[in-house]
Amino acid sequence: MNPANVPPALRPFIPLAEKFGIGDDGYRDELLFRLDINELEELIQAFDEIPQHVLDAWLVGEEANSLAPTHEYVTFTCLTMSYYMAKVRLKTALSRMHSE
């Protein structure tokens, strides 16, 4: 991943994006379904540290309409998908724990 293609405020989160910003839906889901509750919480907490106004501005900016977005843009977009899926998975896992 080329840091020059990532807004400066988001560069510290490149390792998180590289780990969880998987472009293939199946592989991304497979990874998230293997995470335990602690790992899901860690992903959610790490993502919550991202300056959302910077991420949102980038993801809805001019590159959103590009026919050829950068690898970095796509990876951070997929990280966002992983975050929302992790929240659902965590809620489901906690719900199951409380019902047992």
Image: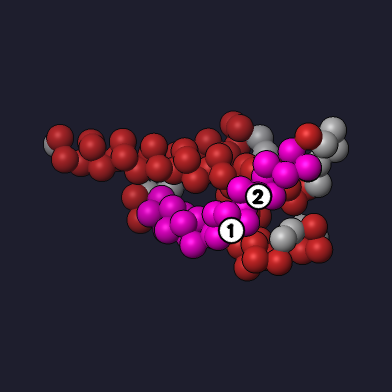
Which residue position holds label 1? 16
Q: Residues within 10 Å of mark 2 (few under 14, many from 20)?
A: few
Q: Quadrant of the C terminus?
A: top left
- In the rendered view, tell whether residue 67 sits above or below residue 72: above
Which residue is pictured at 47% across the width and 38% down the height?
A: 85
| Secondary structure state at the residue bearing disc 2 | helix
Report the front residue among 88 and 24.
88
Q: Which residues are magenta?
A: 39-64
Are the residues at dot 2 and dot 1 in contact (C-beta closer than 8 Å)? no
- Disc 2/disc 1 C-alpha distance (Å): 19 Å
Q: Quadrant of residue 42?
A: bottom left
Whichever of callouts 2 and 1 sits on the residue coming sooner in the sequence is: 1
Q: Is residue 63 magenta?
A: yes
Name which residue lies at 53% across and 43% down.
82
Instruction: Describe residue 35's horizontal placement relative to residue 99 as left or right.
Output: right
Query: What residue is shown at x 61% (from left), y 32% (from top)?
Result: 25
Name the residue at 78% across, 47% down.
71
Give the percent coordinates (x, y) of residue 47: 50, 55
- Work out whether residue 64 can be spotted: yes
Q: Residue furthest right?
A: 68
Within 10 Å of disc 1 (Cα), the crowding (few <14, some 14-19, many 20+) is: some
- Residue receiving disc 2: 57
Between marks 2 and 1 in the image, the one whose residue lies nearer the viewer: 2
